Each structure stands twice: as structure tokens, then as C-alpha cells.
Image (cartoon, rainbow, N blue to C red):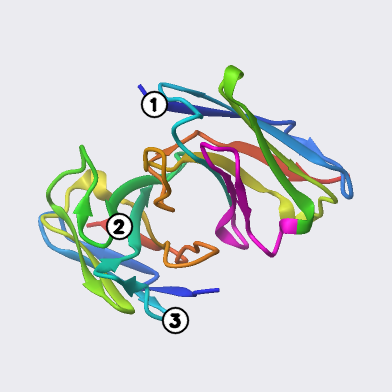
Amino acid sequence: DIVLTQSPASLAVSLGQRATISCRASKSVSTSGYNYIHWYQQKPGQPPKLLIYLASNLESGVPARFSGSGSGTDFTLNIHPVEEEDAATYYCQHSRELPPTFGGGTELEIK
Amino acid sequence: QVQLKESGPGLVAPSQSLSITCTVSGFSLTSYGVHWVRQSPGKGLEWLGVIWAGGSTNYNSALMSRLSISKDNSKSQVFLKMNSLQTDDTAMYYCVRDPFYYGSSWYFDVWGAGTTVTVSS
């Protein structure tokens, strides 16, 4: 199975500043021009919510302060400017092969 | 409005089986696939399996021998059955939609609220 390693495990960012979350795959999740990484946000007591699909495509209704980038094995989720409501845990997920797997999560605190 | 809602037993005794129903609305099971994902403190988020619009299934090989997914299109319901439950199967179980119309994307655009399953005697 492809292992996704997220870093940092937690971070605290001041309101209005930038949050950067990394997701590293144990093998390439890119092929045929597509990057098979997706990002989710989960708040306590709620299910995950899709933010970004195929590495850089913003899901409908998601604020433009969220952005994703990367290829191969290294991917990044950026949030700028961070708002109070962005306090949550963020997960990456790959869909390159079976089984799809998730990263361990990054907890974002807003200072 | 696309919605999915899980209903399950809450508590299951060790070695017994688990059955969860996912009732969907706002879309047709004949057009979209539905996956099952579980979340536990110990294992994080784990993909279990999927049933596609045409009725075919894929399973996580780690659980394939214990897992079965089926559906009733007319009732807009998807069913998860897992056998021989152990304490490490304790988790929140989610049904989630695959957003690809008549196809597969292998990511998850709409999630149910989840149903908590505790395996304990």
C-alpha cells in the first residue's frame, strides 16, 4: 500500500498568516498528467469535507484561500490568509492505486 | 441536495457480525458509486470498499475475507456487512459518494455523518 506521511503533525498559525501542510507519498502518485492526491478538512464531531481534488482543483464552494500543489511524491496544501474557522485537522488521500489510503492528519490551530 | 445517512447497531459483541445501512438521497445509486470509510483513533481513516453504479465491488484486500457490500437501488440503500468483528474494528463508519458520474474517481465528495460502532462484550 502507498503510505502518505503528513507534516507537521500539528501547527499553530496566526490569524491572517499562511498555513502550509505537506503530504509525502511512499511512491509516485502521478501518472498520465494527473496527480492523484486529494485534501480534506475535518472539524470535531463532523465527517471530513473535500477541499481539493487531483492535487490542485478547488472543490465547489471551498474558499479560494485554500490551494494545493505538487507532483510525484510531494504535495502541499496552503491556506492563506488563515481564518478562525480554518481550525481543523487536514488529511491527504491518494487514489493512484488500490487501496486508496489517507495521511495521518495535520491539526491546525489558529493563534 | 445530496445526502447520505448511516444506521447501525452501535454495539457489537466480539466475533459477531456488523450490518450497516446507508440511505442516500439527492442522487441515484444507478449513476454513482458509494464507498465505505472508517475512522478510529488507532488506525486513522481507512478505506473499506466500494460498490459501483453497475453493481460491481472492490474491497480493501486487508478486509476482503470479512467484508461484503451490496445495495438496493430501488430503496436507495447501500449495505455493509462485516464478519468476525474484533475490538480493533471499533470505529466511526462512514458511507461516502464517489463524484464521478457513471465512472470512478476514487475520492469522496459527500460524506454521511457516520455511525459509531463499538466492539465490546
The residue pinned by badge 1 equals B2
Taking the image as shown, residue A105 lies to the left or right of residue A33, namely right
Instruction: Give the position of the N terminus of chain B as an image quadrant.
Output: top left
- The percent coordinates of residue B15 (x first, y second) are 89, 49
Disc 2 secondary structure class: strand
Marks 3 and 1, how far apart in space? Answer: 34 Å
| Residue at image point 51% right, 36% down | B53
| Residue at image point 29% right, 67% down | A35
- The percent coordinates of residue A14 (x first, y second) are 17, 60
Q: Which mark is residue A109?
A: 2
Residue B32 lies within the magenta run: no
Disc 1 secondary structure class: loop
The residue pinned by badge 3 equals A26
User: Which circle's residue, 3 or 2, is located before the other in the chain?
Assistant: 3
- The percent coordinates of residue A67 (x first, y second) are 17, 58
Asked whether disc 3 touches disc 1, contact meaning CB atoms under 8 Å apart, the reply is no
Residue range in magenta is B39-64
Same-chain check, marks 3 and 1: no
Residue B51 lies within the magenta run: yes
Q: Is residue A31 or residue A9 the one in the foreground?
A: A31
Q: Nearer the observer, disc 2 or disc 1?
A: 1
Disc 3 secondary structure class: loop
Marks 3 and 2, how far apart in space? Answer: 27 Å
On screen, residue B99 above or below B75: below
